[in-house]
Amino acid sequence: METLEKNICQSCGMPMLQLADFGWNGDGSINTEYCQYCYKNGAFTDGDITLEEKISKNIAMAQKMGMSRASATDLAVTTLPNLKRWGKKKEQRKSGSRIKK
Ligand SMILES: [Zn+2]
């Protein structure tokens, strides 16, 4: 049995509930890891984007969908860095290690 319930896009965190939500590979097959907005025809639609840019893009999009800026920010900064697309860069920022005066 397959469940689509827990599929979220590994680039933007969007829940993918139906086949139409998924991205697709170059050969037309469904890519189950990324959504249609992030991944089309075997490539990211925003290939050069950084995690930070993606986060602000996501916040803007969530706000358009009616979310408050605070919740949108909270959601994006907690979700996106844990996704597969961004996970390979392990930038761990320790608090207190970046004190500049
Ligand atoms: Zn996505």
Image (spheres, rainbow, N blue to C red):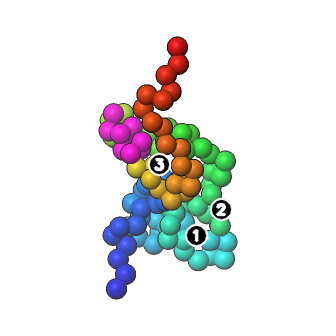
> Label 2, on which residue?
43
Where is residue 30 shown, x and y percent of the image? 54, 74
**Mark 3 burial class by Cα count in 10 Å: few <14, some 14-19, many 20+:** many
> Label 1, on which residue?
24
Q: Give the residue furthest to the top.
A: 101
Q: Mark 1: which secondary structure?
A: strand
Rounded to the nearest whole Å, what is the CA distance between mark 3 and mark 2? 20 Å
Where is residue 73 shown, x and y percent of the image? 39, 37
Q: Between 1 and 98, which is closer to the camera in this rendering?
A: 98
**Rendered position, 83 above or below 17:** above
Tag 1 near tag 2, CB within 8 Å: no
Q: Mark 2: which secondary structure?
A: strand
Q: Mark 3: which secondary structure?
A: helix
| Three-letter residue code for mark 3 | Pro
Residue located at (52% from left, 54% from top) = 87
Q: Is residue 9 within the magenta segment?
A: no
Q: Between 73 and 92, which is closer to the camera in this rendering?
A: 92
Q: Is residue 74 within the magenta segment?
A: yes
Highlighted range, magenta: 70-78
> Label 3, on which residue?
81
Residue located at (45% from left, 36% from top) = 94
